[in-house]
Image (cartoon, rainbow, N blue to C red):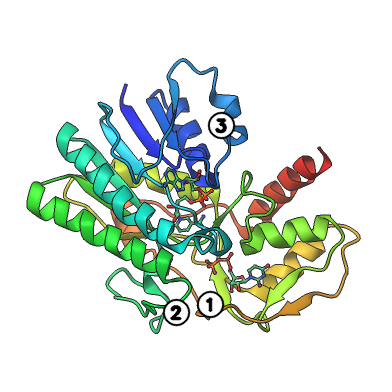
Amino acid sequence: MKRILVTGGAGFIGSHLCEKLLNEGNDVICLDNYFTGSKANIAHLLGHPYFEVARHDVTMPFFAEVDEIYNLACPASPIHYQYNAIKTVKTSVMGAINMLGLAKRVKAKILQASTSEVYGDPKVHPQTEDYWGHVNPIGLRACYDEGKRCAETLFVNYHRQNGVRIKIARIFNTYGPRMLPDDGRVVSNFIVQALSGKPVTIFGNGSQTRSFQYIDDLVEGLIRLMNSDDEFTGPVNLGNPSEFSILELAEKVMKMIPGCNITPDFKPLPEDDPMQRQPDIALARKKLEWEPVIPLDEGLKHTIDYFAKILKR
Ligand code: NAD
Ligand code: UDP
């Protein structure tokens, strides 16, 4: 049995990861400050004898004897990470330092939830791991993008200087049950708006693209990465290469929700909003023997069913 720490464990991705790690027979500590996470996300795990929860902020040191650390703590939706931009940078940078320090002391393996945002508004398409990115260091998204880039720098240097066993996952847009209804990200926004009989809000003309990965595929990829050979540190892209424009996504969601045929509400495109994004996953296929298996239509169906249920409550 491995003792595993999941920071941000009460969030969208973290709660699914905690659940799978417990189901695989591990001893799991979920650490969270509940900024965007919730106890409701992990309520079903609370009776489990090998599940423990710590209310804690990763900007402060944390002590526990563990074998593995998944460092997920950080708000991921633009409206949440821009709410307190300085705190977002601190969470990524000081959180990485504290968790790497812990990994070094207890000789744990540590995985960083990095992001496709390290590529910024990319000039290379699809994005491969050797692309250095095109990021505005002083823009509104910089608190998130640059915080995550600095966390990657810290990870590789703890590896080079101190021999800490690291893994870096560059996660592309992921969606599924347990996103917050007011999360602000596009998939949850469109579904919640359509289910509430409101027009979906399309930013810009909707021609910008994203590649949407269902949560179960990501969790499988994260665990495979953690269990990969020690020499393989990443960074490695984890995402679904099927790319859609935001307009196509809106049409799909509206088609899947009966009676929803309201004209979309077009709003201005936010600053520095990337125009296109698609992962090249050749490295993950080769090193992790992993690729996403859940198509957008199927994942959207599960997500719509989830939101339909929670909106009725
Ligand atoms: P989320 O907002 O649902 O989860 C983040 C969790 O971290 C929340 O539970 C929040 O309360 C917690 N948290 C935030 N700041 C904290 C702090 N200072 N100390 C302790 N806990 C803190 O977001 P998510 O979608 O589950 O994302 C999880 C991780 O994956 C994040 O690091 C995010 O950057 C990364 N990621 C997500 C996506 C995606 O599409 N969902 C894409 C790329 C990267
Ligand atoms: N978006 C949109 N309507 C919304 C929310 C988002 O058109 O209600 C757009 C947003 O401008 C971006 C894309 O959808 O181009 C993905 O946004 P999200 O915040 O989900 O992820 P990110 O931009 O971080 O990839």
Residue at 24%, 49% in the rendered image: 97
Is residue 252 in view?
yes
- Decide which of 32, 133 is in the foreground and name it: 32
Looking at numbered disc 1 in the image, what kind of residue is underneath it?
Answer: Asp
Return the residue at label 1: 273
- On the image, the x and y values in percent for residue 44 come to 60, 26
The residue pinned by badge 3 equals 42
Q: Earlier in the sequence, mark 2 or mark 1?
A: 2
Kindly indicate the quadrant of the structure image that contains residue 38: top right
Q: Are marks 2 and 1 in contact (CB under 8 Å)?
A: yes
Q: Residues within 10 Å of mark 2 (few under 14, many from 20)?
A: some
What's the mark number on residue 121? Answer: 2
Query: Disc 1 versus disc 3: distance between alpha carbons?
Result: 32 Å
In the image, farthest residue toward the left: 161
Label 1 sits on a secondary structure element that is: loop
In the image, taking residue 181 as reference, residue 223 lies left or right, namely: left
Q: Examine the rendered structure and indicate whether residue 15 appears above or below residue 59.
A: above
Quarter occupied by residue 208? bottom right
The kind of residue tagged 2 is Asp
Whole-percent x, y for residue 263 in the image: 85, 75
First-in-chain label (3 vs 2): 3
Dot 3: what SS? helix
